[in-house]
């Protein structure tokens, strides 16, 4: 069993390291941010496999936001030309998801 607050501290540290990179080069940093959010969602029990049956009872807005941001991230990773506005949208979705997930975790105090 992990100590309460450990995940929160690790995630906060990782986010703080990524935040300035997001501001300087959002497209290049998007995959790393996506990976962090994915790990957080999995740790919190969100099904990310895409099976609608697995989604029952799970916050659909969280999953929809993650999938929308992940789709843009996948396009970036594939080397596709992605509108900067779409990249900004993915960044905002990831930030909102980060805030939402962090609010669910116990404080590390």
Image (spheres, grey):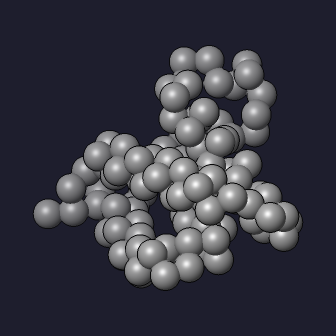
Rendered position, 106 above or below 65:
below
Q: Which percent across, then down, holds residue 69? A: 62, 49
Report the label total: 0
Residue 49 appearing in the image: yes
Horizontal side of 66 relative to 109 (left or right) equals right
- Camera-nearest residue between 86 and 20: 86
Q: Which percent across, then down, holds residue 17? A: 42, 81
Quarter holding the N terminus is bottom left
Q: Residue furthest left?
A: 109
- Camera-nearest residue between 42 and 68: 68
- Camera-nearest residue between 99 and 46: 99
Residue 14 appearing in the image: no
Horizontal side of 41 relative to 75 (left or right) equals left
Rendered position, 66 above or below 81:
above
Question: Residue 5 falls in which quadrant of the image?
Answer: bottom left
Quarter holding the C terminus is bottom left
User: What residue lies at 36% left-to-right and 75% top-to-bottom?
Assistant: 16
Rendered position, 59 above or below 100:
above
Rendered position, 24 above or below 69:
below
Horizontal side of 83 relative to 95 (left or right) equals right
User: What residue lies at 35% left-to-right and 50% top-to-bottom?
Assistant: 99
Q: Which percent across, then down, holds residue 107? A: 21, 56
User: What residue lies at 29% left-to-right and 57% top-to-bottom?
Assistant: 4
Question: Residue 77 falls in which quadrant of the image?
Answer: bottom right
- Camera-nearest residue between 68 and 103: 68
User: What residue lies at 76% left-to-right and 34% top-to-bottom?
Assistant: 50
């Amino acid at each position: 069993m992990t100590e309460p607050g450990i995940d929160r501290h690790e995630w906060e540290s990782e986010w703080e390291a990524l935040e300035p990179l997001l501001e300087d080069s959002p497209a290049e940093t998007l995959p790393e941010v996506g990976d962090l959010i994915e790990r957080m969602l999995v740790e919190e029990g969100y099904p990310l496999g895409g099976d609608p049956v697995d989604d029952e009872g799970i916050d659909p807005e969280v999953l929809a936001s993650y999938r929308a941001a992940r789709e843009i991230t996948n396009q970036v990773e594939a080397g596709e030309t992605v509108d900067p506005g779409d990249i900004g949208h993915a960044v905002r979705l990831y930030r909102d998801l980060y805030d939402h997930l962090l609010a669910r975790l116990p404080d590390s105090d």
